[in-house]
Structure formats: C-alpha cells, structure tokens
Amino acid sequence: MFIYNHKKWPELNWNSDQLIELLAKVRHLQGKLIGKLDAVGFDLKNEAHLESLSQDVIKSSEIEGEILDDHQVRSSIARRLGLDIGGLVESDRNVNGVVEMILDATQNFNEPLTTERLFSWHAALFPSGRKGMQKIIIGDWRDDSTGPMQVVSGPMGRERVHFEAPAHQRIPREMDRFLKWFNSETQEDPVLKAAKAHLWFVTIHPFEDGNGRIARAITDLMLSRAESQPQKFYSMSAQIRNERKAYYEILESTQKGDNDITQWMNWFLNCLLNAIDNSESTVRKVTEKHHFWNEHKNTPFNPRQIKTLNRLFSDFFGKLTTSKWAKINKCSQDTALRDIQDLVKKNVLKKQSGGGRSTSYEVIIPKD
C-alpha cells in the first residue's frame, strides 16, 4: 500500500518535538548567510546569486541524467537577470527552459502556484515536445496511456517497482487539493511547508516526465518565501544530487509508509542544513574572484587567459595543465604553454607542488 491509498491521505503529520531543534538551526543559518552576503556588497551578492542559481539548474537536471552545458546555463541566467559577466555564449532551448522555470519560481515566489503556471513550467522543460526521441504529453497531466506511472529499476523481466503513482483519473482532484493547500495561509513554517510540498507533489507525480525537476522548483519557490527574498545563495538541488542515493531511499520508504512523515522531514532539514553549509565555498570563491580581478585590474590578459581564469574561479574540476588549457581554449599545446608561462611571469599562476606526470598550476589568490 502506498501512502496515497491510506484513508487519511493527504493529511501528513510529523513529530514537531523531533524537528524543532533542526528547524531552529536551519533558520539561524539562513539568516546568518543572508547577513553575510548583505555585508559584501552589491556586485559580490549578485555573483553569489548567479553561482547558486547555476548550480540549481545544472544539478537538478543532472539528478535526472541530463547534463547541461555550464557556460550556457550561466549565460542564460546572466542575460535574464541583466548581469554583465562577460564571455556570454548562446544557450540552447532546453537550457533556457530550465532557467526560466527556476527564475520564475524564485523571482516570483509570492505569486500563486496554479495549474497554468505548472503547465508553463512543464512546457519550458520540453520545448521540442519530446524526451529524446519519444513524444510526450506537454503542458497537461499524464494519461497513463502506456501503463501506470512507475519508478522501477533492474533488468527487463526482473524489474523492481519502487513506487507507483496514483492513477491518472485522480490527478485533477489531487492537484486541486495540493494547490489549495500550497497557496493558503497555514500555521506551518515555510521551510517545513517546502519539505511537505516536495513529498506531496512527487507522490502525485502528475506529469509524464519532469516531475522531479518541477518538485525541486516548487521547493525553491517555498524556500524563497521562507526567506522573503528572490536571491538564493545555496542550492538545495546540488545537495540532493550529492545525497541522491539517500534521497531516493527516504522517498521510497516514506511513500510506502503511513501519514507520519517525520523521517522524511528530518532528512529534508538535514539536507537543507548541508546545502547552506556548502554555500560557504560559493561565497569564498566569489570573494576570491573579486579580490583577484581587483588586484589585476591593470594586468594585460588575452581572451584565452581571461576565459580560463574565470573558469578556475567557478566550475573548474581537477588540476590545471597545459592539455586542459588547450582543450578549454581549442588551441595548440604550444599556445597553451605560452599562455601559462606568461601568467607565471606576471605572478598570476604558480606551479603546484606534488609533481606527477604533468606539471599543474594554481591561481595565486591575493591576500584580503
């Protein structure tokens, strides 16, 4: 029996005594983070907001197995927020669609969540009307024409059903109840309401595809309401991606349980705590980047050097080598080496200790 088949559905309860301390920690860290960003200045605050939103878009799609180009994501967000970041690239329709959904959720967090709004989000996620080669129902509820909506794993013939969503005939009534609750003034703290909304929506699973990404957008919307501001400085989706195995396990056990969802609420609050904690690295990167470019505002750089240095302060993974430089800039190894040696002479890069088969380099961060 799944949770939606219980007589008390959709009444969902939890033990407040078990959550009150966790909720207090979350609220404290939210306020502390916002205060810290308010103190660093307008430009750095916008940069941190851009980084967090980029992570949200990239990681929410990655959870579903879709890998988005990080430069396209960053460019798409910057254009829509009117931020001048330089080096903008063209972005694909599918990238723009996810960006538009997340921005609508966070920038317009006080607007009611309606059926029409959800349909527009869904259409934005699938601009071609297809998932890969498969045509799917866009901007409307699923119809189960190919069978019940199930979450399965395992090889064909030995599949394991982790969850089966309510039959499509129930969706209009289920969504009416969900939206009425979501838009109403309740006694629940908005952070707790975000956790409950996430679980409730993915349990209904109203669309043929895209339910997870829309559930995370709904979560972001309610968390923005909790903080009463459109700017986000942490990424819940990135943290869910980090804890994906635990996320699916707690979802499955809760959806196969009764209407006591204390364990789910506990997991959600801990995940949110981790997301806010991890935002420290985003703030540090943004601050270091600001100090770096301020220190080198009069240093001459070529376009390849500017591009790669910016990458090193945002989404660069692993060590910087001549081969990586050549790949990033689509240039020869000789050109890459000359670029790097020039930056070493200018006291911008230095060789990393440790040696190895390839020499690697790191940015010299100016002291604050």
Image (spheres, rainbow, N blue to C red):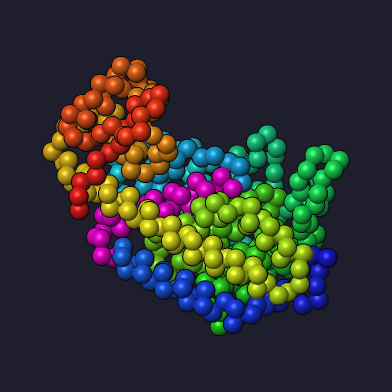
Q: Is residue 111 left or right of residue 311?
A: right
**Magenta region:** 38-63
Q: Quadrant of residue 86?
A: top left
Figure quadrant of residue 320: top left
Q: Nearer the viewer, residue 263 or 140?
A: 263
Q: Is residue 191 visible?
A: yes
The chief SS type of the magenta part is helix
- Seen at 44% across and 62% down, the residue is 276
Q: Is residue 170 magenta?
A: no
Picture coordinates of residue 90 (x, y %)? 41, 35
Relative to 366, 75 lies left or right: right
List x then y, in percent, for residue 128. Answer: 60, 39
In this image, 163 relative to 202: left or right? Answer: right
Q: Nearest the camera: 219 or 78?
A: 219
What residue is at 40 percent from the left and 63 percent from the top?
A: 230
Q: Residue at x 54, y 62 (%)?
A: 271
Q: Residue at x 32, y 69 (%)?
A: 35
- In the displayed structure, 353 sits above or below 187; it is above
Quarter of the figure with residue 185: bottom right
Q: In the displayed structure, does residue 45 sit left or right of residue 301? A: right
Coordinates of residue 14 in the picture (x, y in percent): 65, 77
Q: Is residue 54 magenta?
A: yes
Instruction: Tell me residue 104's x, y (percent).
Output: 48, 57
Q: Nearer the viewer, residue 299 or 124?
A: 299
